[in-house]
């Protein structure tokens, strides 16, 4: 079949639907595929044409845009995937991809995954571009970080200019994913530092909102709330590991008295193995690892989450916030893997929500007061906020 000068979008959730609308507005014919027929219906109502498989889409469109929630989904649509772990190569993009075509991966995907499929595309005389995105930036469209060969970037540029408010070509294949990883690493660790600061101030009798307003700090308003959202979606993430055979002696997964965190090798290399037993916060036995909460919902691929979590242990000083962010990332990845949460499930939260849970569980008030002020200094310690009447004027 002669391919049309069109763009195919695989994955038409919230971001994919935006892509469809923008491409149609710019005059591109658009084909779409999604495992959810309702999403295809929405895209068709906008003017796109639905197809039956990724292979059928690649058979019709010169440019294929992947808008998928993680590496495993990229693998599935490229190779062809049926129910469960079944593979049907006839349905995959690689089955019909040919000379001159272009695949653009806009998701947060592991570098090695994108490099693998870039080689597969090259073997077919096609191009592959990694272009993960962020909404941090100017305009009402995302910013894209691009990794590609010069030729691949030149081919992708007309489409990238439609899909983004701005984009930058950082270098060869995989460069875009590396920039995205660095960007997210900073975001999550800065958010964790903010959460630790807010809890430190509150538990030492100071109004954190007043302090951050005075300093004009960009701290999420939700961190100032006294109550925190909770649904059963976080049940897996609040479990604790009560088997401590591999816990570091003397640290029991907690922060040292100097305010830094000492690592404990309490997980297998892939972060997914080991017995896990649910335990309420008040029932933590000596030597148990503290409950570890999710940092954000960006890591939809569990292995990628663990990789970035470990990156925080090497790219930055191992401060309390950074190391706890690594543990939270590992535990978050495991909870997603266990629960098989889908992107935009009701159990997903904005990044500030799980951070609120995290700081409440991981930093008891007495620890904050201990590191904040020593009672032996002869001064009156700040009042315990927990002992104050809620009606008192603070």
Image (cartoon, rainbow, N blue to C red):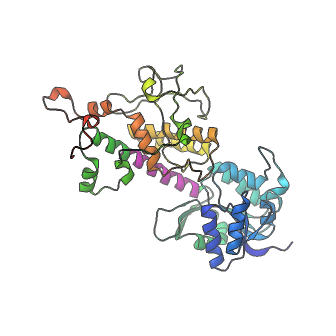
Q: Magenta region, mostly helix, strand or loop?
A: helix
Visible residue check, residue 43? yes
Spot occupied by residue 41 in the image (x, y as percentages of width and height): 72, 66
Q: Between residues 256 and 342, which one lies in front from this camera angle?
A: 342
Q: Between residues 310 and 327, which one lies in front from this camera angle?
A: 327
List the single residue furthest toward the bottom. Answer: 27
Spot occupied by residue 138 in the image (x, y as percentages of width and height): 45, 69
Question: Any magenta on residue 185?
Answer: yes
Residue 305, by quadrant, is top right
Spot occupied by residue 356 in the image (x, y as percentages of width and height): 41, 44
Question: Any magenta on residue 169?
Answer: no
Left/right placement of residue 296 relative to residue 381 reads right
Q: Quadrant of the N terminus?
A: bottom right
Left/right placement of residue 1 relative to residue 21 reads right
Using the image, determine if residue 122 lies above or below residue 244: below
The span picked out in magenta is: 175-193
Q: Which residue is drawn at 64% across and 51% down?
A: 70
List the single residue furthest toward the front. Answer: 391
List the single residue furthest toward the left. Answer: 378
Q: How many marks?
A: 0
Visible residue check, residue 319? no
Q: Which residue is drawn at 67% across and 68% down?
A: 151
Left/right placement of residue 39 relative to residue 240 reads right
Spot occupied by residue 389 in the image (x, y as percentages of width and height): 25, 39
Left/right placement of residue 52 relative to residue 297 reads right
Using the image, determine if residue 34 lies above or below residue 270: below
Q: Which residue is drawn at 52% across and 71% down?
A: 165
């Amino acid at each position: 079949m002669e391919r049309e000068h069109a763009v195919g979008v695989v994955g038409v959730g919230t971001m994919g639907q935006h892509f469809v609308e923008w491409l149609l507005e710019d005059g591109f014919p658009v084909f779409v595929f999604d495992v959810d027929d309702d999403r295809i219906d929405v895209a068709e109502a906008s003017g796109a044409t639905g197809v039956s498989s990724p292979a059928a889409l690649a058979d019709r469109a010169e440019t294929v845009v992947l808008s998928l929630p993680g590496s495993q989904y990229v693998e599935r649509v490229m190779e062809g995937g049926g129910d469960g772990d079944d593979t049907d190569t006839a349905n995959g993009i690689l089955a019909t991809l040919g000379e001159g075509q272009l695949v653009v991966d806009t998701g947060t995907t592991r570098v090695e995954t994108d490099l693998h499929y870039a080689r597969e595309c090259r073997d077919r005389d096609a191009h592959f571009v990694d272009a993960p995105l962020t909404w941090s930036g100017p305009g009402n469209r995302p910013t894209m970080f691009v990794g590609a060969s010069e030729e691949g970037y030149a081919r992708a540029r007309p489409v990238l200019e439609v899909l983004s408010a701005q984009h930058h070509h950082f270098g060869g294949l995989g460069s875009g994913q590396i920039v995205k990883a660095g960007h997210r690493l900073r975001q999550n660790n800065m958010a964790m530092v903010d959460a630790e600061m807010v809890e430190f101030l509150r538990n030492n009798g100071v109004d954190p909102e007043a302090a951050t307003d005075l300093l004009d700090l960009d701290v999420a308003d939700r961190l100032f709330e006294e109550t925190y959202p909770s649904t059963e979606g976080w049940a897996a993430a609040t479990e604790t590991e009560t088997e401590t055979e591999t816990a570091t002696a003397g640290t029991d997964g907690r922060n040292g008295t100097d305010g830094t965190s000492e690592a404990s090798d309490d997980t297998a290399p892939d972060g997914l193995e080991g017995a896990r037993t649910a335990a309420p916060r008040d029932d933590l036995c000596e030597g148990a690892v503290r409950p570890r909460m999710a940092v954000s919902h960006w890591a939809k691929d569990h292995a990628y989450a663990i990789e970035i979590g470990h990156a925080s242990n090497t790219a930055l000083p191992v401060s309390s916030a950074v190391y706890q962010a690594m543990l939270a990332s590992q535990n978050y990845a495991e909870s997603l893997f266990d629960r098989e949460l889908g992107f935009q499930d009701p159990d997903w939260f904005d990044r500030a929500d799980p951070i609120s849970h995290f700081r409440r569980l991981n930093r008891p008030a007495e620890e904050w007061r201990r590191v904040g002020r020593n009672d032996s200094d002869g001064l009156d310690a700040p009042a315990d906020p927990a002992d104050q009447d809620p009606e008192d004027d603070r």
